[in-house]
Image (cartoon, rainbow, N blue to C red):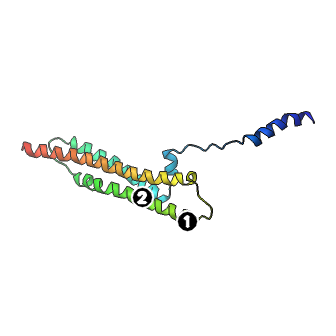
Amino acid sequence: MSQLSKILYPMTFLALVAPAVAVAEPLRPRDIFLNAAPFAQLLMIVLIGSTIAAIIVCVRKLMSGPRLSGGSAFLSGLRLGGPLIGLLGGAYNGLSMAIGIANVSHPVTLKVMAPGIAEAVSLIGLGMLAGAVAVIGHWAVEARIDRAVLKS
């Protein structure tokens, strides 16, 4: 046995006895967005933008002083529409996953399905977040309007 064989043999034996485990990169929200379908990406952008817009409308409305300005209709619409848009995205994603699983001939593991599940859950979560922000903003604006009306 040569010197090189004496060194490589134990390494080969260890590689056969204890195979290396492939470590996957952890899934992050950025990765969920970047790997999502274009429709899901669009819905995510719309929901995040709507949530930010609801915060801006609420702050501007509350800071407007004694005059009452517009924006209540947007908050009212978002508090109902945000969760529905999120559920629409989640349902679309679930349908796409079911079609994909049905068209594959070999069994699909949960590790393969996890990014799709994460995408659907993030869409539903963003919709609920947009709805919750809009509900809280709408309550604050309505309370402000009630105070302004009752003072006069």
Residue 76 higher or lower than 137, as above or below: below
In the rendered view of the protein, which quadrant contains the N terminus?
top right
Which disc, if any, is residue 79? none
| Residue at the right extreme, as displayed | 1
Horizontal and vertical percent for residue 75? 26, 52
Which disc, if any, is residue 89? 2
Which residue is painted at 88% across and 37% down in the image? 5
Mark 1 sits on what residue?
102
| Residue at the front extreme, as displayed | 17
Q: Which of pointers 1 and 2 lies earlier in the amino acid sequence? A: 2
Q: Taking 42 as reference, is 65 left or right?
A: left
Give the residue type at disc 1: Ala
Distance from disc 1 to disc 2, alpha carbons, whole Å, reads 20 Å
Residue 40 higher or lower than 63, as above or below: below
Horizontal and vertical percent for residue 89? 42, 58
Which residue is painted at 37% across and 50% down in the image? 49
